[in-house]
Amino acid sequence: MGNIIMLDISGIRRLQFDVLIIGAGGAGLSAAIAASQDKKIKVGLICKSLLGKAHTVMAEGGMAAALGNVDNRDDWKIHFRDTMRGGKMLNNWKMAEIHAKGAPKRVRELEHWGAVFDRTRDGLINQRNFGGHRYPRLAHVGDRTGLEMIRTLQDHGIHQGIDIHMECTALDILKDKSGKVSGIVCMYRETGEFIIFETKSLIFATGGAGKAWEVTSNSWEYTGDGYGMAFEAGAELIDMEFNQFHPTGMVWPPSVKGILVTEGVRGEGGILKNSEGNRFMFNYIPKKFANETANSVEEAARWLEGDKDARRPPELLTRDVVARAINAEVKAGRGSEHGGAYLDIATQRSSEDIKKKLPSMYHQFKILAELDITKEPMEVGPTCHYFMGGIKVDAETSMTTVDGLFSCGEAAGGMHGANRLGGNSLSDLLVFGNLSGMEAAKYSKRLKSMPKADDGDIKRIIKNATSILNREKGNNPYLIHEDLQKNMQYNVGIIRTKKEIQYGINRIEDMKLQFQKVKAPGSSQFNPGWHEALALRNLLISSESVARAALLREESRGAHTREDFPSERDEWLEYNIINKKGANGEMQTIKVKRSEPDKELKRIANSPIEDLEKEVIIDHNKL
Amino acid sequence: MKERDFKIYRGNDEKGELVSYKCNVSEGMVVLDVIHRIQADQANDLACRWNCKAGKCGSCSVEINGKPRLACMTRMNEFEEDKTVIITPLKSFPVMRDIVTDVSWNYKQNQKILPFSPSEKDKEKDFVMMQKDVDRVQHFRKCIECYLCQNMCHVIRDNEGKDKFAGPRFMVRLASLEMHPMDRADRIKEIKEEHGSGMCNITRCCTEVCPEEIQITDDAIIPLKERVVDRYYDPVMILFNKLFGKKKKEITD
């Protein structure tokens, strides 16, 4: 650009770290704890909210790990196979393997740090059924597993010598001349004060961008900050077209539309019905899953009673299937009163069981919808929930395509392929949080000195932020955000077509122009309007990458459904879609050929379940 | 849809005032929805803290008509339609801006608590704990750290008490550790001296405001007080402790 920005930055505070983590949900805290185990490594942790409030607290159902406490036939191989099938085989094979193998150890570690899971009759960690998981696999605490996890990590983490900065927003990454990460510019939300964190490595545990949609289970924080900053720094984003719509969000009253209703309701036996009282999921069983799914109400009932020969009820099919089914029922005019489906646990379990196993759901509906779930069915419908895609990382090190930038948790892409299984997120946070923390620490140790940032970059980042406040007048950031949410909801939603996506992209281009003239009134101190405006850039980058990838992928796979290409196309299984910044700053969206998987992993994922179960028995007998 | 009247505190810790707003309220709306609507349409810079909007994260604690509440779980239909709803910051903590308070004091209290400490030997194998033995600990662990109890506790409201008492939230945390079947640490001395269990005089205000309905006073604070009394004031226990040491629980082999 050549413009020299006149701005005195000598007064801005600077702090130095070996490893700096952005985001303090389950992944960020796990990463910080792992990195801090080497006491020579100086670790910092930055979070946008107060510590312990990240979206991990909203996770309800549990964390998947093949502990085998409830059904000892379980094994990492079966968990791996379930994960790959759930992800429609588009998952990064190696990541899915590392996850399935590593999850049990991490769950036990969490227990050693103080988590108190529900118990089996033998006093071990109890496990519940969930969509797409062959066996009861989710370690859980009622329906507040995420709270248990974040509190445990928080209470353990604060004694590990980690320097924690709360209510601090990251603005952009700094790099040295060779392209290595050298730091990040941040801003304290309370005071508006800027701060420069110089660091040898950075871990992005920044979550997803669910706030780009109108009906969402995500809070204000999920604005794709990690995607936006990583993109600007030249990192690649992968699989961005796969956005999980959780089948069961609240639909009524309007002010709570989108708030999550745990899959645990179905795991505990809840059934889905349409306005005609039909248990419609029996009509939506995909061929691939037909021989592992109950084909009658009677068989599903036997399964709920614990009959090991009965197959799973169709309500526990993967989330993409259930979300589309509800969507289709509503479209066919068989929706519930407020445009969803009925989720009924009241007729399936006793009132005490429901209050014991799903206490926060009971509470949530009682207060927010004035409805007693032990007596009446809930009304539910799809809500934007999770990004399967994200920053592309190396499976074994979690490093992105930018030297020194690591990523884990929802922010990172690849592990879940085209659709994530419920319960695989919390375990992902632990497994890859840990891995990225260790690997970033190793990387930082190898660097002899702190990479040096360019002052010009620092000035540019600060100028971009302050100009939003200093502009005389301009566009209201809240209204641009509302427009964007509507745009994504209607044009890049659950069911997509070329025409709508193209229109959606044009609208995003308009909004990018409006964003150039965004104005936040007020001062720099705890000013939500300013914070909203700062987040908008990242939301726009995230949304554009979703829309462009969705346009390119001309098939329906997992959570990405193209009405104009209604089924999976084998040729597309060969490719991932990558978004990255081009030479002129434009977004490039390209097909990249996937590498050939390890033969053994391919064999496991494609084995018939009966064969794999026999193999696992042999494996277990060897131990 | 009906237009209703609100007054919201605007300002900082030194000076501020109640500012009047009007906002349309439709069916099912909670107080947090109103705050967001006002923020988007009339006052872009109105500071408020929130996250989950479902009573699970404990961020949006404020006082509504003088009562400590979670804004996301307080429905507008609780209030009479023609009455003004007044939203103010928590009284026990310094105001950062508008209805956002500086709750960092709470984080400092947590830092002082000796964390969960199982024995190395127990960590070698899977923990075996029966459900009935962890029920009470799980009840404590429902806490969402909204600090409404801390705000309500008159020991903490009276600023001088902040040096002497960790507050109900951290009595709950201490109780969850002390009653954890696998924990081997002894915190009784600290509970008495550092965390100030004696400061609570059992008025139960904390329990009344807990959105998770944790029986803070009866299940957490009173049992901790009893443990302190057993250690320091019971002559039989004092002799026992002298003879056999103060280990709370025997380490299982």
Image (cartoon, rainbow, N blue to C red):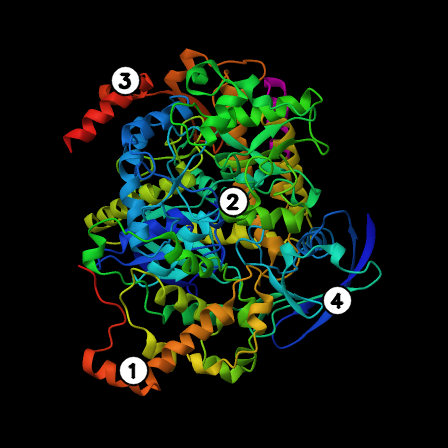
Which comes before the other along the chain, label 3 or label 2?
Answer: 2
Between the C-alphas of marks 3 and 2, the distance is 36 Å
* Region of the chain picked out in magenta, as a range: A495-510
Q: Is mark 3 on a helix, strand or loop?
A: helix
Could you tell me which residue is drawn at 30 percent across and 39 percent down?
A: A67
Between the C-alphas of marks 4 and 3, the distance is 70 Å
Have a look at marks 4 and 3 and say if they share a chain.
Answer: no
Between the C-alphas of marks 2 and 4, the distance is 47 Å
Which comes before the other along the chain, label 4 or label 1?
Answer: 4
Instruction: Please give the residue where the numbered disc 2 appears in the rendered image.
Output: A353
Label 4 Cα crowd, 10 Å radius (few <14 / some 14-19 / many 20+): few
Instruction: Please give the residue where the numbered disc 3 appears in the rendered image.
Output: A611
Magenta: predominant secondary structure element? helix
Q: Mark 2 lies on which chain?
A: A
Of the pair A262 and A387, the residue shown nearer to us = A262
Q: Is mark 4 on a helix, strand or loop?
A: strand
Between the C-alphas of marks 1 and 3, the distance is 62 Å
Query: Is there a contact, CB below 8 Å, between mark 4 and mark 1?
Result: no
Instruction: Please give the residue where the numbered disc 4 appears in the rendered image.
Output: B19
Residue type pointed to by label 4: Val
Residue type pointed to by label 2: Asp
| Residue A451 % position (x, y) | 28, 51
Residue type pointed to by label 1: Met
Decide: is A473 above or below A552.
below
The answer to whether residue A569 is left or right of residue A328 is left
* Quadrant of res B91: bottom right
Query: Is there a contact, CB below 8 Å, between mark 2 and mark 1?
Result: no
Of circles 3 and 2, which is in front?
A: 2
Of circles 4 and 3, which is in front?
A: 3
Instruction: Please give the residue where the numbered disc 1 appears in the rendered image.
Output: B237
